[in-house]
Image (cartoon, rainbow, N blue to C red):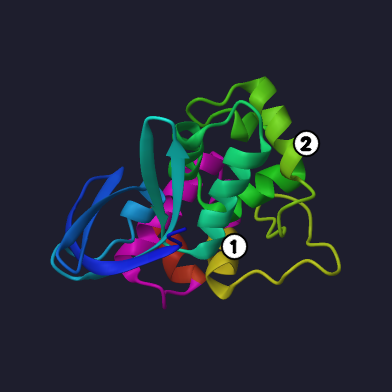
Amino acid sequence: MITRISGTLLGATPLHAIVEIGGLAYEVNIPVTTAERLPQVGQQARLHTLVVYREDSQTMYGFTTEDERDFFRLLVEKVSGIGPKTALSVLSKLSLPVLHGAIAAGDVGLLAKCPGIGKKTAERLVMELRDKIGVTAPLAVAAKPGDPAPSPADNKIRDAVLALVALGYKAADADKSVRQALVALGPTATTEALIKKALA
């Protein structure tokens, strides 16, 4: 099983990346949230991967973090009715902290806004995954004792999204604006800087 690749980024679109390793070029399907964080073409890229084998194909999916890859695997393996294409669209629409929060809160309305996810699938997603994710609840309940602590980056994203939602933004729009601000400002940006950039 190929779990990570590192090499030269030859090209990228919002849903694909081509990474060259030792003279071989690998096409990797990626969500928009990963494409936003790729380096410039010609630079070194590292993706955490999952390869899905079918009778007639082998497809590699790549993500910026292991947590995103593991969440993708949960979607594909644990939620009936969600295949790799739909799982990729879910991770393209919302960042992982917002997805975790929506599942923890049972926010079926927000999840149903993801392409390929209707109300029934969103309800199934909440039911199947609520007990399986480490809750970093950006829009929901506080984490339970024993849950893994959210990363500082997740905290910044969560707090900035919450601030925009309090100002009247829809959760999905707030999440997208904060992600774009994080890409523009870099990983060292403070929560306040992310909010200001997202509002600009």
Q: Which residue is mark 2?
A: 127
Based on the picture, tell me whether residue 41 belongs to the magenta stretch. Answer: no
Closer to the camera in the image, 42 or 174: 42
Q: Position of residue 171 (x, y in %)?
A: 56, 42
Q: Is residue 78 above or below residue 26?
A: above
Q: Residues within 10 Å of mark 2 (few under 14, many from 20)?
A: some
Q: Main secondary structure of the magenta part?
A: helix
The segment highlighted magenta reads 162-190
Based on the picture, tell me whether residue 176 belongs to the magenta stretch. Answer: yes
Closer to the camera in the image, 70 or 168: 70
Q: Nearer the viewer, mark 2 or mark 1?
A: 2
- Looking at the rendered structure, which numbered label has been put on residue 159? 1
Secondary element at tag 2: helix
- Residue that protrudes farthest toward the front in the picture: 55
Tell me which corner region of the image, top left, top right, bottom left or bottom right, holds residue 2. Answer: bottom left
Q: Residue at x 23, y 45 (%)?
A: 13
**160 left or right of 146 in image:** left
Determine the CA span between mark 2 and mark 1: 26 Å
Q: Position of residue 36 (x, y in %)?
A: 32, 55
Q: Note whether residue 93 is visible.
A: yes
- Residue that protrudes farthest toward the right in the picture: 145
Closer to the camera in the image, 64 or 138: 64
Tell me which corner region of the image, top left, top right, bottom left or bottom right, holds residue 76. Answer: top right
Q: Residue at x 48, y 37 (%)?
A: 84
Tell me which corner region of the image, top left, top right, bottom left or bottom right, holds residue 56. Answer: top left
Q: Residues within 10 Å of mark 1 (few under 14, many from 20)?
A: some
Tag 1: residue type? Asp
